[in-house]
Image: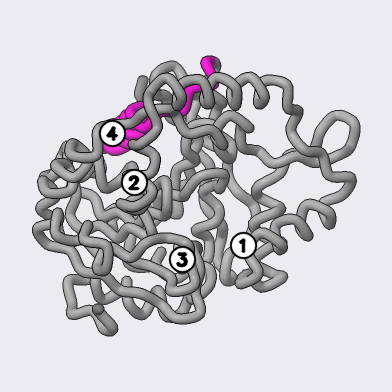
């Protein structure tokens, strides 16, 4: 615990040197994060979502790095972090990893911007350790909508367990998809999110793949992260954690996303000090789809100033 290793990045981001790759350890896993420098500035954690990686924040980090000491981790099983030997990716493990990173680097009180799965992790962490989080932005990070949760809850636990076992067994026999060239992987990335520019899709692809021994390319994430566990914290417990968050919280949503807006579905009521802002012409990856608008909203929020466009 607490050991760090360093690998200097050589690329340039917006004309300035890119981040430094570093390592920390959590539950015996070797986990990766990037450090954007500026250590005398206040700490800002950027936490990515499922099947993503820490370098998806490069455009955000490039614009915020002058005012913040930015740390962006790869979640376990993602990016350049180690895969779980048990193929288990439960929420408790993710929360522990975040808690260890903040503890080992002595970041608290820390400001956090997090997306999707990363948002769910950060929100729960902030409810467990409310004094450790100064401000929090969660991009579509509240998880499944109340309606989806109700539908899921109608299935008896034996049925959910059988489904999970069958899906786990199927994944055990599934090899990571191989792409003949980086261009093939890039096309798949672009198909996944039509809002991405070709430049964005190419950047995300280059940092999101490894080359196999036979010369083909595969995504870095562990296939098992696709499978959500058959049970989670009971929803009342999750809502209790949300209610324990004391820091100002901004919940960000894209109007073209599949995600349910908490201002409309009732989940906002569980927060003491939260606001919702939604973006036109944006899907699930608001920080990619509307980068300028996202930063124009988030920067004043992080600085403690009024936020334009609050719904």
Residue drawn at x 45%, y 43% is 73
Residue 125 in percent (x, y) is at 24, 40
Q: Tag 4's secondary structure? A: helix
Q: Which mark is residue 99?
A: 4
- Residue 175 visible at all: yes
The answer to the question of whether label 2 and label 1 lie on touching residues, with beta carbons closer than 8 A, is no
* Residue marked by disc 1: 12
> Which of the two discs, 1 and 3, labels the residue nearer the N terminus?
1
* 1 vs 3, front mark: 3
> Which of the two discs, 3 and 4, labels the residue nearer the N terminus?
3
Disc 4 from disc 2: Cα separation = 14 Å
> Which of the two discs, 3 and 2, labels the residue nearer the N terminus?
3
Height in image: 99 above or below 295? Answer: above
* Residue marked by disc 3: 60
Q: Is 96 part of what is drawn in magenta?
A: yes
Residue drawn at x 69%, y 41% is 219
Q: Is 38 part of what is drawn in magenta?
A: no
> Which of the two discs, 1 and 4, labels the residue nearer the N terminus?
1
Magenta-tinted stretch: 86-106
């Amino acid at each position: 615990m607490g050991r760090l290793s360093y690998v200097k990045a050589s690329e340039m981001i917006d004309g300035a040197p890119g981040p430094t790759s570093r390592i920390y350890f959590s539950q015996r896993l070797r986990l990766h994060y990037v450090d954007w420098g500026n250590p005398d500035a206040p700490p800002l954690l950027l936490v990515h979502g499922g099947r993503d990686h820490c370098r998806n924040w490069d455009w955000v980090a490039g614009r915020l790095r002058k005012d913040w000491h930015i740390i962006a981790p790869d979640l376990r099983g993602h990016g350049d972090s180690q895969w779980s030997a048990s193929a288990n990716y439960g929420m408790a493990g993710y929360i522990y990893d975040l808690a260890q990173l903040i503890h080992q680097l002595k970041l608290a009180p820390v400001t956090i911007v997090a997306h999707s799965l990363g948002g769910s992790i950060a929100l729960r962490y902030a409810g467990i350790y409310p004094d450790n989080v100064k401000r929090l932005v969660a991009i579509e990070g509240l998880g499944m909508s109340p309606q989806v949760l109700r539908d899921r809850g109608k299935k008896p636990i034996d049925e959910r367990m059988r489904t999970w076992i069958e899906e786990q067994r199927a994944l055990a026999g599934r090899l990571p998809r191989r792409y003949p060239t980086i261009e093939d992987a890039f096309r798949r990335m672009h198909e996944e999110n039509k809002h991405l520019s070709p430049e964005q899709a190419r950047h995300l692809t280059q940092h999101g793949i490894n080359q196999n021994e036979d010369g083909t390319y595969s995504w870095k994430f562990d296939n098992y992260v696709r499978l959500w566990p058959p049970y989670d914290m009971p929803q009342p417990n999750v809502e209790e954690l949300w209610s324990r968050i004391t820091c100002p919280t901004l919940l960000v949503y894209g109007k073209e996303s599949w995600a349910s807006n908490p201002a409309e579905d009732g989940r906002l009521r569980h927060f003491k000090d939260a606001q919702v802002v939604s973006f036109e012409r944006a899907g699930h990856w608001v920080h990619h789809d509307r980068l300028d608008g996202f930063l124009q909203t988030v920067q004043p929020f992080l600085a403690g100033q009024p936020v334009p466009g609050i719904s």
